[in-house]
Image (cartoon, grey):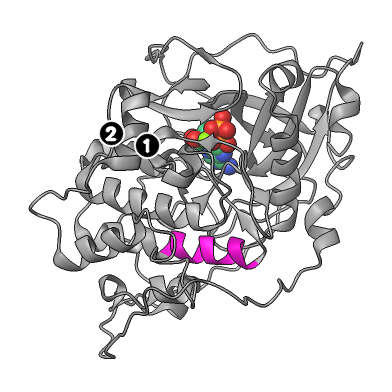
């Protein structure tokens, strides 16, 4: 088991099969660097190719509508298992290979600025395009580490899945490249930081705030599942906020095209579904379990099966009763009971109408889903981004390392990453 140290001494990420523990590094409080010296105005969309000249992005007039009340009565279907789903609209071949992402960029196209995040296999940097002056995020993974931790297939899947997806609440990847030691993925830079950071600062979110983020994530999951992609690593660390406060799901490190079932034990202990813990074959319904854990964590400030000892967390996932703090709304308790359900034939999201059942649950009764998808709902919180598009004030500081990117030399693992 590979356990990655995460923030606040919480052990969050699990990547099998290497069995080892790593030290929890202390966060270094370094001084803010002066790299954000530009006062560039932020445009609504970050979707500008790093190679293109700076463009005027049209500002959409967003209808500032609150989450409105929907008078309709909602009936939920339970106990029916999810069968006979129509095949995905996208061809399997495309999903397996994804579009070509290599060869479009290389390191000389960018300046590498500070580190935005570190994970089990590499780090994510803020970068700036030498062509259009805009900021992007660069995820860098060391080939040797990927091989050592047996993550070659997951890493190739990460590229493929990111090259296939296109959704308002999912990160956009522009291209990939490699040198002899690393692989690189260029993505839009999402400047509002992680929901994790906001949640730890706020301790917990009020019911409507949690519901707003959950609604946007629900649509992202629905979209991924419609392509037969399981996400498998839903948690607040992987959910970013854009400058307006809408979510962007990032980190496709465990995302996989799974039309039927799969077996790999991966994810983050607190968020892993019981069928994964007990190494049974599993499907997309694991994401609905994690979705329940996410809603619970946003409302309570902690996950339901938390334990400082990971093995005890697993034991609780398998056996412990789901308990709620007294302040949880009745509808919230009801949807959580149905999502965090060990019985797969009863788990919401895994029933006859799939994600529709989740969207029709009374906890979401006031949500107008079309407006959520169109980002027409006023966000609960706008990240304080004052320095334009390259503002990094919402990210924690990480100790910077010497980087040796761009070296072309002996490349013993290159053959494993041909699509980068
Ligand atoms: N596109 C992005 N824009 C801004 N920050 C990002 C972006 N992608 C990742 N990050 C930051 O880097 C962290 C690590 O990236 P992630 O893809 O989750 O890697 P890992 O697989 O190591 O968890 C994220 O939790 C987030 O803080
Ligand atoms: Mg991550």
Give the mark, 2 or 1, whose residue is nearer the N terminus: 1
Q: Secondary structure at mark 1?
A: helix
Magenta residues (range): 216-226
Residue under the point 37% across and 15% down? 29
Q: Is mark 2 within 8 Å of ligand 2?
A: no
Tag count: 2
Q: Is mark 1 within 8 Å of ligand 2?
A: no
User: Between 154 and 418, which is closer to the camera in this rendering?
Assistant: 154
Q: Is residue 402 above or below residue 171?
A: above
Quarter location, residue 265: top right
Residue under the point 80% across and 33% down? 109
What mark, if any, has residue 270 been given in the picture?
1
Residue under the point 37% across and 53% down? 342
| Cα distance between the residues tagged 2 and 1 | 6 Å
User: Between 386 and 69, which is closer to the camera in this rendering?
Assistant: 69
Judged left or right of residue 63, residue 73 is left
The secondary structure that dominates the magenta segment is: helix
Q: Is residue 33 above or below residue 278?
A: above
Quarter location, residue 138: top right
Q: Estimate the x, y position of residue 153 in percent, counting from the top left.
A: 74, 35
């Amino acid at each position: 088991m590979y356990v990655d140290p995460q923030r606040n001494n919480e052990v969050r990420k699990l990547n099998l099969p290497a069995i080892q523990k790593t030290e929890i590094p202390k966060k270094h409080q370094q001084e803010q660097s002066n790299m954000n010296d530009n006062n560039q105005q932020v445009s609504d969309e970050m979707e500008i190719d790093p190679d293109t000249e700076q463009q005027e992005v049209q500002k959409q007039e967003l209808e500032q509508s609150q989450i409105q009340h929907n008078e309709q009565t909602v009936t939920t279907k339970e106990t029916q298992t999810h069968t006979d789903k129509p095949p995905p609209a996208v061809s399997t071949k495309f999903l397996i290979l994804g579009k070509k992402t290599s060869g479009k960029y290389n390191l000389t196209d960018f300046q590498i600025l500070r580190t935005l995040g570190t994970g089990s296999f590499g780090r994510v940097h803020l970068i700036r395009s030498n062509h259009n002056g805009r900021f992007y995020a660069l995820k860098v993974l060391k080939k040797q580490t990927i091989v050592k931790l047996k993550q070659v297939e997951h890493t190739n899947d990460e590229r493929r899945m990111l090259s296939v997806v296109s959704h308002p609440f999912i990160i956009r990847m522009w291209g990939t490249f490699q040198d002899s030691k690393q692989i690189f993925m260029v993505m839009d830079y999402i400047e509002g930081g992680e929901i994790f950071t906001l949640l730890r600062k706020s301790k917990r979110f009020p019911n409507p705030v949690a519901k707003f983020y959950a609604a946007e994530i629900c649509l992202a999951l629905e979209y991924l599942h419609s392509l037969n992609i399981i996400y498998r690593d839903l948690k607040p660390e992987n959910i970013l906020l854009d400058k307006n406060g809408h979510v962007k799901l990032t980190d496709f490190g465990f995302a996989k095209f799974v039309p039927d079932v799969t077996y790999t034990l991966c994810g983050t202990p607190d968020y892993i579904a019981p069928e994964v813990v007990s190494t049974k074959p599993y499907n997309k319904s694991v994401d609905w379990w994690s979705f329940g854990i996410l809603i619970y964590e946003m409302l309570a400030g902690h996950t339901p099966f938390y334990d400082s000892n990971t093995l005890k967390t697993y034991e609780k996932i398998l056996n412990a009763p789901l308990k709620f703090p007294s302040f949880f709304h009745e509808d919230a308790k009801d949807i959580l009971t149905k999502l965090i359900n060990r019985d797969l034939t009863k788990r919401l999201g895994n029933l006859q109408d799939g994600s529709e059942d989740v969207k029709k649950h009374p906890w979401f009764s006031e949500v107008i889903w079309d407006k959520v998808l169109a980002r027409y709902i006023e966000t609960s919180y706008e990240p304080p981004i004052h320095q334009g598009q390259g503002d990094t004030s919402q990210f924690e500081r990480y100790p910077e390392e010497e980087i040796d990117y761009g070296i072309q030399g002996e490349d013993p693992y290159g053959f494993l990453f041909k699509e980068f």
